[in-house]
Image (cartoon, grey):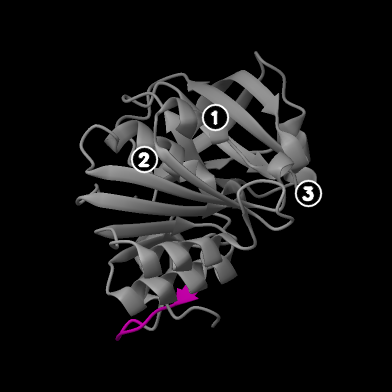
Amino acid sequence: MNCAVLENRPLAGGFFYLSLKPDQPFGAITPGQFVMIRCGDGLDPLLRRPMSVADFAPDGSRLGLLIQQKGKGTELLAELQAGAHVDVIGLFGNGFDPPRGRVWMVAGGTGIAPFMGYVQTHRAQAGSLTVFLGARSAESLLMRDVFERAHVALRIATDDGSAGHHGLVTALLEKALANETPPEMILACGPEPMMTAVAALAARRGVPCGVSLEARMACGFGACLGCVTKVKGPELYVTVCQKGPVFDAAQIEFGL
């Protein structure tokens, strides 16, 4: 689908926010779903890049992407100006379950993206929503203002102690689980070590946990087999794009 660039806003630490308007609405979006975006007009880079949808219009007539500049593909996307056009296909995958009572969301890096849409979609019906946001430093905290404007409880951890808890966001979560009544759901998105730790903490307290896996993929619909991950049960291996990207954390064989 042809999408016009409405905004391309640089953020700290090599991240940027890309707002797109498709020729035709994508339709209803579930927070946690993703799109595949073409990075240039030529053959280099050849493959599309998977991007989790961040905020969006209810009918899919606008969507935002939170992107980290890592290589040539994302460098080309970072250079797009308002009024330019990009080719996007999707929507792909499943999303996070609607809230059941109180929900704690744990995010690191671009893992905050799906929770922007989750808060936007579910803040009125949830018992309460709390975001645990981790970053290397205060400068690297992404989209903090989005959650502050939504009046969502925000707990911050930074590796260097320049904002909030001094240390990992998982340590902040562990402290909260030890000293407070656990929520009805925990959701996580970010680096795999972070999600591995979140899944273990949730399992220890018996709290259902959903995780959104980040994986390299070329197609988005299971043909390339580039995003295979190991799961518990008879299937053994599944593609993240078809069966995820959101999974019950108890299903995933983390680190394998």
> Does label 3 or label 2 sit earlier along the sequence?
3
Q: Number of numbered discs present? A: 3
Q: Could you classify mark 3 by the number of other residues whose Cα lies within 10 Å: few (under 14), some (14-19), or many (20 or more)?
A: few
Look at 67% across and 15% down and name the residue there: 82
Label 3 residue SS: loop
| Residue 232 belongs to magenta span | yes
The CA distance from mark 3 to mark 2 is: 28 Å
Q: Is residue 230 visible?
A: yes
| Residue occupied by mark 3 | 71
Look at 48% across and 37% down and name the residue there: 54
Mark 1 vs mark 2: in front? 1
Range covered by the magenta-colored residues: 229-235
Label 1 residue SS: helix
- Of residues 219 and 132, the one drawn nearer to the viewer in this rendering: 132
- Of residues 54 and 195, the one drawn nearer to the viewer in this rendering: 195
The CA distance from mark 1 to mark 2 is: 15 Å
Q: Are marks 3 and 2 in contact (CB under 8 Å)?
A: no
Q: Are marks 3 and 1 in contact (CB under 8 Å)?
A: no
User: Which amino acid, by three-letter code, is at mark 1?
Assistant: Asp
Label 2 residue SS: helix
Q: Could you classify mark 1 by the number of other residues whose Cα lies within 10 Å: few (under 14), some (14-19), or many (20 or more)?
A: few
| Residue occupied by mark 1 | 145
The CA distance from mark 3 to mark 1 is: 27 Å
In the rendered view, does 93 fall on the left or right side of 85?
Answer: left
Location of residue 140 (image quadrant): top right
Examine the residues drawn in magenta and state their main secondary structure. Answer: loop
> Does label 3 or label 1 sit earlier along the sequence?
3
| Residue occupied by mark 2 | 118
Q: Are marks 1 and 2 in contact (CB under 8 Å)?
A: no
| Residue 179 belongs to magenta span | no
User: Which amino acid, by three-letter code, is at mark 3?
Assistant: Gly
In the rendered view, does 29 fall on the left or right side of 189?
Answer: left
